[in-house]
Amino acid sequence: MGAGDPEFELLDTGIFRENRYFDVFFLYAKADPDDILIELQACNRGPQEAALVMLPTLWFHNCWSWGRHDEGYGPRPDLWQEGGQVRARHHELGDWELNYAGNPEVLFCENETNVELLFGQAGSGYYKDGFQRYLVEGVREAVNPKQTVTRAALCYRLRIGAGQSETVRLRLRPLAKKKDWQRDFSAQFAARRQQADLFYSDHPTLARRAFAGLLWSKQFYNYAVHQWLDGDPGQPPPPPSRKTGRNSQWIHLYNRDVIMMPDK
């Protein structure tokens, strides 16, 4: 390629030849503020039946392994499988459950850094790259056979026909809600769609896409400069150059919030 040639794009690689790809749509609706209904729709756009592994995952933000005990840090929470569902327990959020349809393989590992791979430290554990190592590299001991840690995934191994689709349903809600989780699922989704259509009826395309972009671009942003300079007690110390590096004079800065990141 020369300077006068157009930029090399993903389509130029040929990976979408004959439409051999999947579209996966993530749909969410709320039955109430703490009751979240989820549909994952996988569509095979190709000319032949093909296999797809979907891995919807539930995990806790790691606030327990850094050796800190100030705001935002706390004891290690738990995820485990019980009664055909994934249960979750957190010292502030309480007890929750992730309901799921079908018969997926439920995988567990820790939402913690692989210190052996990243830092070259001696150690052992079910690190957060465990699902990749298990599914891609075939390392069976990368996931926890006891099924009780801080990161859980539902492994759906699907075979989807040409032009066909498969839908996986999930529901995340407080444990106290004992009713059949699928009984009102379709009705709740239909009601939320109707309400959304009514809300955006005056500007159905522009406003809807704008609001969707704002919702999708939310992320947790945590930046405490004095902690960043000192490093975490439970982790390897940062390089000495950090003490005089970027933002090193902003020792008063403490950010811990959910913000919009429109650059997504």
Image (cartoon, grey):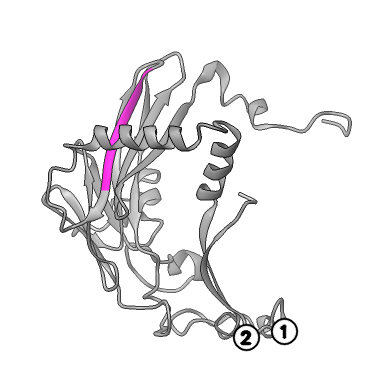
Q: Is residue 125 magenta?
A: no
Q: Which of the pair 208/203 is nearer the observer?
A: 203
For the residues labelled 1 and 2, the Cα–Cα distance comes to 15 Å
Residue drawn where x is 57% and y is 86% of the image: 230
Horizontal and vertical percent position of residue 225: 60, 80
Position of 120 with respect to 191 (left or right) is right
Q: Is residue 177 left or right of residue 77?
A: left
Image point (39%, 15%), residue name: 162
Measuring 57% from the left and 31% from the top, which residue is drawn there? 205
Q: Measuring from the top left, give residue 122's x and y in whole percent.
A: 41, 73
Highlighted range, magenta: 164-171
Taking 30 as reference, is 68 above or below it? Answer: below
- Residue 157: give x, y in percent of width and height: 30, 34
Q: Which secondary structure, mark 1? A: helix
Q: Is residue 2 left or right of residue 177?
A: right
Few, some or many residues within 10 Å of mark 1 (<14, 14–19, 20+): few
Q: Is residue 35 left or right of residue 10?
A: left
The relative height of residue 127 versus residue 74 in the rendered view (above or below) is above
Q: Residue at x 55, y 51 (%)?
A: 217
Image quarter for residue 255? bottom right
Q: Position of residue 63 (x, y in %)?
A: 39, 73
With respect to residue 19, does 90 lie above or below?
below
Give the quadrant of residue 88.
Answer: bottom left
Front residue (pair 93, 242):
93
Residue 219: assigned label: none
Instruction: Name the residue nearer the viewer: 151 or 167.
Output: 167
For residue 244, which numbered disc appears in the image? 1
**Viewer-nearest of discs 1 and 2:** 2
Q: Amino acid at mark 2?
A: His
At numbered mark 2, what does the secondary structure look like: helix, strand or loop?
A: loop
Q: Return the mark for residue 252.
A: 2
- Name the magenta segment's main secondary structure: strand
